[in-house]
Image (cartoon, coloured by chain):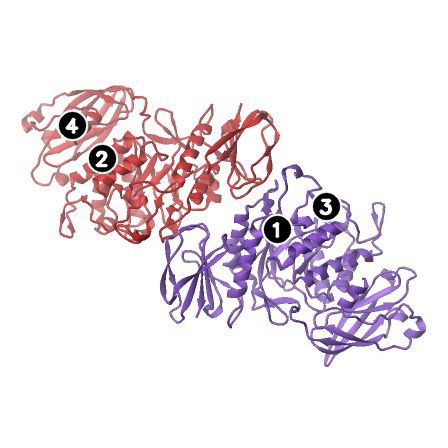
Chain colours: A purple, B red
Amino acid sequence: MNRRQMLKVGGAALVGAAANTAEAAHPRSALSSHVEQWNVFEQTLSGPRSGNPFLEVWTRAVFRREHREIWVDGFYDGDGIYKIRFMPDEPGTWSFETDSNAAELKGRRGAFECIPAHAGNHGPVGVRDTFHFGHADGTPYFPFGTTCYAWIHQTEELQRQTIESLRGGPFNKIRMCIFPKWYQYNHGVPPRFPFPRNGEINDYTQFNPDFFRHVETCIQQLRDINVEADLILFHPYDHWGYQEMPPEVDDRYLKYVIARFAAYRNVWWSLANEFDLMRKKTNADWDRYARIVTESDPYAHLRSIHYSRAPYDYSRVWCTHAGVQDYAFDKAAEWRTEWRKPVIFDECMYEGNINSRWGNLSGEEMTRRFWLCTVAGVYGGHGETYVRGDEIENDKAILWWSHGGTLKGSSPSRIGFLRRLLEQIGAQGGGRIGLEAIEPVYYLSARRSANEAMLWYFDFHQPSYYDFSLPEDGRFKAEWIDPWDMTRKPIDGVFTGKTRIKLPGKPYQAIVFHKV
Amino acid sequence: MNRRQMLKVGGAALVGAAANTAEAAHPRSALSSHVEQWNVFEQTLSGPRSGNPFLEVWTRAVFRREHREIWVDGFYDGDGIYKIRFMPDEPGTWSFETDSNAAELKGRRGAFECIPAHAGNHGPVGVRDTFHFGHADGTPYFPFGTTCYAWIHQTEELQRQTIESLRGGPFNKIRMCIFPKWYQYNHGVPPRFPFPRNGEINDYTQFNPDFFRHVETCIQQLRDINVEADLILFHPYDHWGYQEMPPEVDDRYLKYVIARFAAYRNVWWSLANEFDLMRKKTNADWDRYARIVTESDPYAHLRSIHYSRAPYDYSRVWCTHAGVQDYAFDKAAEWRTEWRKPVIFDECMYEGNINSRWGNLSGEEMTRRFWLCTVAGVYGGHGETYVRGDEIENDKAILWWSHGGTLKGSSPSRIGFLRRLLEQIGAQGGGRIGLEAIEPVYYLSARRSANEAMLWYFDFHQPSYYDFSLPEDGRFKAEWIDPWDMTRKPIDGVFTGKTRIKLPGKPYQAIVFHKV
C-alpha cells in the first residue's frame, strides 16, 4: 500500500514500526482524523516476524460506537506488519481495541471520527424489496454486470485499459476471480501467485501479501468508479492446484481474503464459478465455505454461488441472491418467486465470435437477453468474447470476458440504455423499487409497485398496434422505446384503462407507461 | 363442372341426362377413353330427383382391376345427377359396377383405361421412411405449407390472385377450411353456403352442390400447380352453425365430402383446426369422425388434427402425421420419436404485423422457425398476416392467412430457398429420405441416413469457426449457407473426421456437408 492509497483508506495513524513488546503492555490510543462512512479504516501494527506469523499469530479487534460492537479479524501483511481493517457504517466516533496471541498486537486501542459519505459514496449494496438491490444509503442499485474473470492477472497496461473501459460505462458490477485462470485463451503465467511457490509446489503455509495487495488495489479502483467487485472465491479453471487445496488451506484462504477485503464496500462474494465442475469438493465443503463467509464477514456483503449444470438450491439461507448460469428466461419470474430473493442471470452466454457455444451471441441477442431479464423482474449479465481471425485459440488474444481491455461489441451501449431506463422507471416515485413480471397475456411485461411504471417488451413480435389494459385508477403517459436504436419517443396523450397504441411494426420494440 | 374440367378429370363418358329407369334395369357398359393414373375418373348417372335424394338415395360402386376391388361412395349433385368418382392408382383397364337403393343407379357397369401419369403427376402424398413424406410414384415430398383458411370463400378475382401467388412459389401445401370463416378480419358473407339457408336456418337435410363444386374447382386448381390441399373439415370460427351441427349431420357431411373430394390426389384431411376450441364436441365425436374418414376414404389420404391448447395424442393410429400448433422447437425431435410419425409444425405463428400475438412475427423469425424445424427433422408451416395502417381490424383488409391474395412478407422467398436445399440434401443419393436431428452437442444439426448429408444451423450463435466431428468413414464437401441472403458458397476442400471450418461471424448461418 503506497502513501496515496493510505490517505484514501482513511489516513489511520501508522503505529507500529517502532513498537516493541514493552509498549504493547501499555495500550496506547490513536485517534485518526477522518474516515468517510463506508470507506476503509485501517490500523497498521508491528508484530512478530519470526516463525510463521501466517500460522502462528492471530489478531483481531473490536470496534465500538454507542451500544454497538463489531469484531473484525486482522491479517499479516508480511515484514512484521499486521493490519486491521474496518468499514464504519455510520458517522461519529468509533473506538477500537485489539486482541492477539502476540503481546505486541494485543490491547492496542484507538479511535477515529467517521464523517458522512460524500455524494458519490452510497455504501455497500444489499437486498432491497425482496427481489432487488439498494445501497446502504437508500439509493436503488440495479445490477448491470459484466465479466472479466482474470483481468487482475494481466499486464498493468491492460488493467489500466479495463478500468478506463468500465469508467462511465454501462456496467456497475464485474465478476472476477481471485485466483489466476487457466483455460482456453488463458495459458499465460500470472505476474503474482497467492502462495509462495517452490517450483511447482505451493507453500500453503504462507500467503503472498503482494498478490493480495494487488487485488485490493483493483477492488479500490473499481470502487472509485462505482463498480461492484463480484469476487469469485474458487473456480475450476486451474493449473496451479488452487481448486484442490487441503480443507484447512481453503478455510485459511477464505478467512484471509475476508480479513483483507471485507472492509471494501463494493465487495460481493461468489463462493465459486461453476462450483459443480470442481470435482474434488463436496456439498459439505460448500456448506463450510458458506458458513465461514457468513461468520467472518461482519458487513454481510452479498453472497451467492454460480453453477454449470444443475441450478444450485438458491433458497438456502446463506445465499442473499441467485447468480445463475442459465438461459431459461421464461422460468426467471417463477424462480424469483420460489427463492424469494433477487435473481441475476449472471451468465446467459456472451456476445462474441469464438468457437465455444457460450461465447458467440450476436450483439442483438445479448441485448435481447437483458430485456428478457428486465421484464421478468430479474437481471442480466454481460460478457464479451471477440477474437480476430488471426487470434483463434491464441493465448495472446485479448478477450474482455477474461482479460478485460476494451469493449468491441454492439450490446454494451444498448445495455447502458436499458440501465438508464430501468434506473428511471424502477425507482422514480414512491413504493418498492424494481420491476415485477406481469402474468403474460400476450407479450412480456413488468410493472413497478403501485403501477408507477409499466414496461412491455415485444421481443420478436411486430404487431401494428396493441390494446394495453392499463389500471382504471391511474393516468399514464407513454413512450415508445427502440432498444437497439436507443431512442425514446413520447406518445401523445394521457391514457387509462383499455388503451390502443400504434406500434412501429418492427420486432424488438418496447412501450413504457409512466404514472402521471 | 364445365366441359374443360370434365376433360381434365379423365373424360369419363357422360351417361345420364337421357337415362331413364328402364335403361337402368339393363346395365350398360361405358368404356371411357383415357384416365391418367391418380387423376379422377368420374361416372355421371341420372337418377331420382323427387323427394330428398340427399337423404333417400344412396349409390356406390366397386372398381376392379385384376385381383383388386375398391368400393367408393357416389353422391347426389342436384338436378337428378349422381356422380361416382374414382382415382385409379395403377395403369391398365379398370371396370366398375354400381349399386344403389334406386333402380336407375344400380348395376350400371363400365370400364376405362388408366394410362401412366404424365411427368408432373407424382400421385398422392403418403408417409415415407416413418418421419417423412413421399408421392405414390416414389418422388420425395417435403412439406413447405402455408395457410389461407378461407381463400375459397373470397371473390373470384382474389381466388385467382391466390392461385397465381402459389404458382411456382415456395409452398407445396395449403391449409384451408371447407366451411366459411367468421373471425377477426373475417366478417363477410360468403358467396355460397354448404347447406341451403332459409333466413338464418340451415336446411341440414340437403347439401348445396354448387358450394361443393366450387371447392372441387379450387382443389383442382391447386392440384394443377402441385399444391396439396390440406382440407380442414371442422373449425370453431363459425357464425352459421357449422360447428354445432347434429351428429348425424356431421357424419353425413363427412361422407359427402369424402365421396366428392377423395378422388383428388392432392387432398389431405385435417379433422379440425383448433379442435379443442369446439366446445360442443366430445372426444367420442372426434373418434367417430376419425373412424368415418378412415373407413370412407379408399385412398388413405393423409389424416391429422390441429389443436389450440394441449397437444392431441398423435400416437393414435388413425393419425398419419402430427400437425401441431406449437413453438416448442426443442421438443420437436422428441415428439417425432415418441409418435413414430412425421411432425409438421403447421402453425408456429405467422409473419405479419397484426395485433394478435400469433400474427406478427418478423420475416426473420418466421424464417428461423422453418430452419429450427428442419434441423429437428420435422417441418414448418407458414402464414402471413400483414395489414396496412388504415386496415386495422377492417373486414376489407386482405390477409394472406385467411383470404389469400398476394404475399407481402420477406420470409416466403427464404422458405423457398430452404425448400430447394432440403429437396436436394434430403433426397439425393440412396437411403431413407429426409433429415433426422443429431443429438445436440453445441449447435443444432441434422443428417440424412448413411450421412449422405449433414446440416448445421447456428441460430443466434456467430462462432468464428467450428470443429465439426464428421464420420471418419466418409469424405465430404462443404457449403456455407446464408439462409437470409439465400446464398450457397462452396468451401474449398474435402473433409473427413474432425474438421475445422471458418464461419462468417454473423448469426443465423448454416453449413451443409455432402458425401462425396
Horizontal and vertical percent for residue A516? 43, 70
- Cβ atoms under marks 4 and 1 closer than 8 Å: no
| Left or right of B82 in this view: B169 | right
Discs 3 and 1 lie in a common subunit: yes
Q: Is residue A209 above or below residue B514?
A: below
Q: Residue drawn 29% across and 43% down?
A: B149
The three-letter amino acid code for the residue at tag 2 is Glu
Q: Residue drawn 61% across and 62% down?
A: A321
| Left or right of B301 in this view: B216 | left
Q: Is residue A308 above or below residue B450?
A: below
- Cβ atoms under marks 4 and 3 closer than 8 Å: no
Residue pointed to by mark 1: A383
Decide if residue B185 is in sight here: yes
Residue pointed to by mark 3: A182
Discs 4 and 2 lie in a common subunit: yes
Residue pointed to by mark 4: B3
User: Which chain's residue wears label 3?
Assistant: A
**Mark pair 2, 1: CA separation:** 59 Å
Discs 4 and 1 lie in a common subunit: no
Horizontal and vertical percent for residue B117? 29, 22
Which secondary structure, mark 4?
helix
Q: Nearer the viewer, mark 4 or mark 2?
A: 4
Q: Nearer the viewer, residue A290 or A352?
A: A352
Label whose residue precedes the other's in the sequence (3 or 1): 3
| Left or right of B278 in this view: B461 | right
The three-letter amino acid code for the residue at tag 1 is Gly
Q: Residue drawn 16% across and 38% down?
A: B209
**Mark pair 4, 3: CA separation:** 81 Å
Q: Nearer the viewer, residue A351 or B497?
A: A351
| Left or right of A407 in this view: B200 | left
User: In the figure, residue B373 lies in which quadrant?
Assistant: top left
Residue pointed to by mark 2: B216
